Image: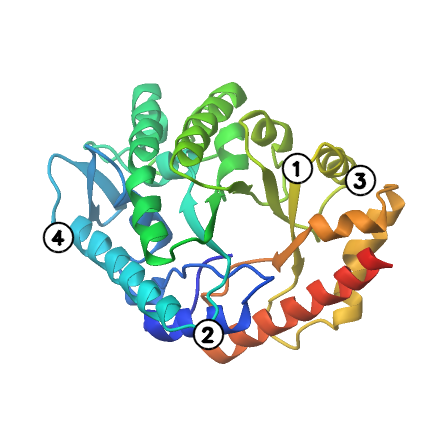
């Protein structure tokens, strides 16, 4: 879904774009193995406008002025974009699409700390400021990416891995002795809507919110104006499948986290195809609508080796081909 093993952005770009050429969706990789600033949270925090961060023992913290950690994150992202431009520019037929991913405003507020060490999620004003600052920063980011891959259709994935805990009030305080008060669902919708609108104005052609399946707020995501939802499939309930089916019938996109990437042998193509097509059929969705689906790994690939991560991408394209054959009848 974005994270990739290793420390070489050029190698990552070449592998990803080689495996996921048209009609698939290559992505700008995150390389957390490079250390501070290349993690998803630091990478997104480097885009904030009029808000700076640095790293403390307890994590990323808002500070008065940019320090070395902020500059390191911004520099790593600039390097990745420049390398993307070089790799894409050398291709005979560049891919028609590119995905980038950002940490969404709710998880960002849960992961960034205030001056006193407490999470920004604690304070309504801080949550509002983080969402507004992120919305203000995405335009410049997409402009830089667009310049690196001229003419490519830009797709944005907003990652909200902590959203269930944010809405349930189970995020721990910095001390760990208490939990933070639950954030109202309407506030999450409004925060997403702010960022989605900014991404749309900046030229994003498709905006997806990625969430874990447990207590995933599908209705809130769609109410915020997102084009669809990315979610692992394995533990979805019947009710969740029904919600997703309704979204698909309403013209929204489903990114199905169908491929289990836990250590060991990758699942057979036929088994993965069936794990998607069986509930699809049971819900009464036509096979032809499978062509609107995207298939993804169930988790990020940062914990894999480069070779095993590449094998995951290869298997994904095989699964996509299998689903496409069903869609075409």
Q: Nearer the observer, disc 1 or disc 3? A: 1
Sequence-wise, the earlier of marks 4 and 1 is 4
How far apart, in angstroms, are the residues tagged by discs 2 and 3?
37 Å
Q: Say whether residue 172 is visible.
A: no
Out of 280 and 160, give the one closest to the viewer.
Answer: 280
Image quadrant holding the C terminus, namely bottom right
To which residue does mark 1 refer? 252
CB within 8 Å, label 2 to label 3: no
Mark 2 closeness class: few <14, some 14–19, many ≥20 residues within 10 Å:
some
- Label for residue 68? 4
Out of 42 and 139, give the one closest to the viewer.
Answer: 139
How far apart, in angstroms, are the residues tagged by discs 1 and 3?
19 Å
Q: Nearer the observer, disc 2 or disc 3? A: 2
Out of 190 and 302, give the one closest to the viewer.
Answer: 190
Sequence-wise, the earlier of marks 4 and 2 is 2
Tell me the SS state at disc 3.
Answer: helix
CB within 8 Å, label 3 to label 4: no
Image colouring: rainbow
Sequence-wise, the earlier of marks 3 and 4 is 4
* Residue that appears at 63% across and 41% down: 214
Sequence-wise, the earlier of marks 2 and 3 is 2
């Amino acid at each position: 879904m974005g994270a990739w093993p290793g420390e070489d952005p050029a190698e990552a770009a070449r592998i990803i774009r080689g495996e996921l050429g048209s009609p698939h969706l290559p992505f700008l990789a995150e390389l957390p193995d490079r250390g501070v600033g290349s993690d998803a949270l630091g990478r997104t925090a480097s885009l904030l406008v009029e808000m700076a961060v640095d790293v403390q023992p307890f994590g990323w913290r808002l500070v008065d002025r940019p320090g070395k950690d902020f500059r390191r994150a911004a520099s790593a992202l600039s390097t990745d974009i420049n390398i993307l431009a070089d790799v894409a520019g050398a291709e005979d037929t560049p891919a028609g699409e590119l995905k980038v991913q950002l940490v969404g405003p709710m998880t960002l507020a849960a992961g960034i700390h205030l001056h006193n060490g407490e999470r920004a999620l604690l304070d309504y004003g801080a949550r509002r400021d983080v969402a507004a600052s992120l919305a203000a920063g995405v335009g410049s980011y997409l402009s830089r990416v667009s310049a690196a891959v001229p003419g490519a259709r830009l797709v944005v994935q907003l990652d909200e891995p902590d959203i269930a805990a944010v809405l349930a009030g189970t995020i721990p305080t910095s001390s760990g002795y208490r939990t933070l008060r639950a954030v109202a669902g309407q506030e999450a919708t409004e925060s997403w809507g702010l960022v989605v609108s900014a991404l749309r104005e900046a030229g994003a052609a498709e905006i997806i919110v990625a969430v874990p399946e447990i207590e995933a707020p599908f209705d809130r995501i769609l109410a915020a104006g997102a084009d669809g939802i990315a979610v692992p499939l394995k533990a979805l309930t019947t009710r969740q499948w029904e919600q997703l089916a309704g979204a698909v019938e309403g013209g929204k996109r489903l990114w199905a986290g169908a491929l289990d990437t836990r250590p060991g042998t990758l699942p057979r193509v036929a088994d993965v195809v069936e794990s998607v097509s069986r509930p699809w059929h049971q819900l009464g969705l036509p096979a032809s609508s499978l062509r609107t689906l995207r298939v993804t790994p169930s988790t990020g690939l940062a914990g894999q080796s480069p070779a095993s991560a590449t094998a995951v991408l290869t298997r994904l394209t095989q699964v996509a081909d299998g689903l496409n054959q069903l869609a075409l009848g």
